[in-house]
Image: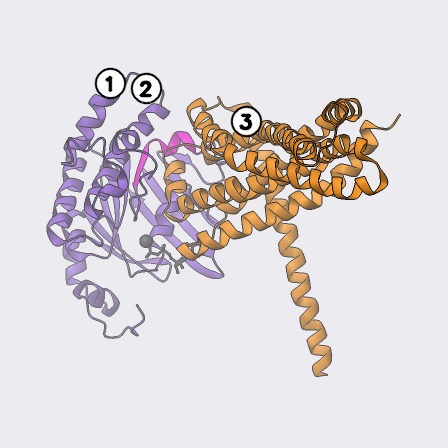
Chain colours: A orange, B purple
Amino acid sequence: MVRVGKVFNFAGVVGGMVTHSCRTAGGVFLLLADTIRTMFRYRVRWDQLLEQMYFIGIRSQVVVLTTGAFTGAVFAAQVWFQFKRFGMESAIGPTVSIAMCRELGPVLCSLLLAGRVGAAMAAELSSMKITEQVDALRALGVYPTEYLIVPRFLALVLSAPVLTGMALVTGIGVGYFVAVQIFGVDGAYYWDNTIKYTDRKDVLIALIKAVIFGVIIAAIACHKGMNCPPGTAGVGKTTTEAVVNASLAVLITNFFLTVLLNAVLYSN
Amino acid sequence: MLELINIRKRLGGQEVLRGVNLKVGQGEKVVVIGRSGCGKSVMLKHIMGLLSPDDGTVIFEGTRLTGLGEEAWNPYRRKIGMLFQGAALFDSLSVFENLAFPLREEGEKNEDVLRGKVAEALKIVSLGGTEEKMPAELSGGMKKRAALARAIIRRPDLMLYDEPTTGLDPIVADSINRLILHLGKMFGMASIVVTHDMTSARMVGDRISYLHEGKIYFEGTPEQVDRCEDPLVRDFVRGHAQGIDVTG
Ligand SMILES: Nc1ncnc2c1ncn2[C@@H]1O[C@H](COP(=O)(O)OP(=O)(O)O)[C@@H](O)[C@H]1O
Ligand SMILES: [Mg+2]
């Protein structure tokens, strides 16, 4: 009897977790729909948008460029170690650039944005929420989605592809440097092959992924922030959860996007 | 001008409001007293439309507000000012920007007009010259006064004060009480003052309502409250803990 009870209890816990996740996911989608509707209904607040663009777009550059550079470097090195055994040095350039465009650039860049920007959004919104600043905004007749969420959302969705593009360029450039200057691969040959085998579609994939990841991070971080439980402990918990959830969502979505974009872009 | 009819609200699994009825006339000053955690802030948030009741109706200047959507509330919210318990100044904006915020939202763009109106509002609350300070640089009493200036800058018809004197020293508290009276006289605004400070309640109230277990338990003028023989009211008014289990 005790064992049966435990099974039921376990089922209850799992069930509770599933309903909680579904409710959260539903909440994120509602927030997203509301954000997009609000974006078209109200005038854009340029001052807020520029402030957020500055924080997200300009202040994230060092982190993103460093990530791009070292990812390109380590990937070029690994590829060289493996490919030279088969005499495939000519394939190093395109391998690095395609991997950077399709996966490494957008995914790593987005993970960093989730950590830096997603955390900042969740922390800022949740502390405004618990100190009643969100209620004060509403009491002054301002719709919080319009004032707080739309500028953050737009700034991240616009900045993510630009930052990803910069990470790609840096990564591919540093990959070239590592392969050519350090391991002595023929430079002209490397570059020629990189250009020849890297398609416009590869860059397009990077940018599409970056935009979608930007949407995911902004929606999850804002949803978490606006639904923070009362108390200062809530802010820390909310921030951590926002980063973890956004990062997982990026990684999981990435797989489906890869399959989907491959099917759409290479269907003929 | 404002009427709450049988407001009920459950929050976090407990029924906080269990049928609150309250009426405020033109220019009238109503004080709502009650113990901590009895639902005073929750009641004020219903008047602002920050929470929506499970049951009951809010009527403001003849319009039924309950059931309006978040954005449909906004025109009415502009006629009601609220001083939050924790001041709730926007901490990323300077005092000037905080006070100018409601005016900018109304479409006022002229910087000179904004400067003038903000300076005037700050003078009313005796905070002249603090425009460029950030909220974090202000003391608790100054924050409350700055938030009060922000709430009255659009000359609302009704002001809601959530524990305006709690946590302040008696002298600052007295100055806030005087300010509430002064504002009522100067602009003829009605007000609801939520407090558990009896000195403040006697000083600013035309009428005192005692909120207990989610209902208005007793209502009367300050004299009637002082003379009331009901043990619950008497203990609260005199600050006794008898007859009440000591919880908080
Ligand atoms: N957002 C909320 N979620 C859950 N419970 C809440 C919420 N807001 C208030 N409560 C509960 O409602 C009760 C009344 O709170 P409140 O109105 O803030 O009391 P007070 O009379 O001191 O202002 C408290 O028990 C509080 O825990
Ligand atoms: Mg309260």
Tell me if residue B77 is in the magenta stretch.
yes
Residue nearest the observer in this picture, A222 or A176: A176
Q: Are marks 1 and 2 in contact (CB under 8 Å)?
A: yes
x, y (%) of residue B54? 49, 50
Residue identified by numbered label 3: A39
x, y (%) of residue A63? 52, 37
Q: Which mark is residue B51?
A: none
Q: Which mark is residue B108?
A: 2
For the residue marked with disc 3, what is the amino acid? Answer: Met
Residue identified by numbered label 1: B113
The mark nearer the N terminus, 1 or 2, is 2
Q: Are marks 2 and 3 in contact (CB under 8 Å)?
A: no
| The N terminus of chain B lies in quadrant | top left
Q: Are marks 1 and 3 in contact (CB under 8 Å)?
A: no
Residue nearest the observer in this picture, B106 or B33: B106
In the rendered structure, which segment of residues is drawn in magenta? Answer: B71-82
Between marks 1 and 3, how big is the CA–CA gap?
30 Å
- Viewed as shown, does residue B82 lie left or right of A255? left
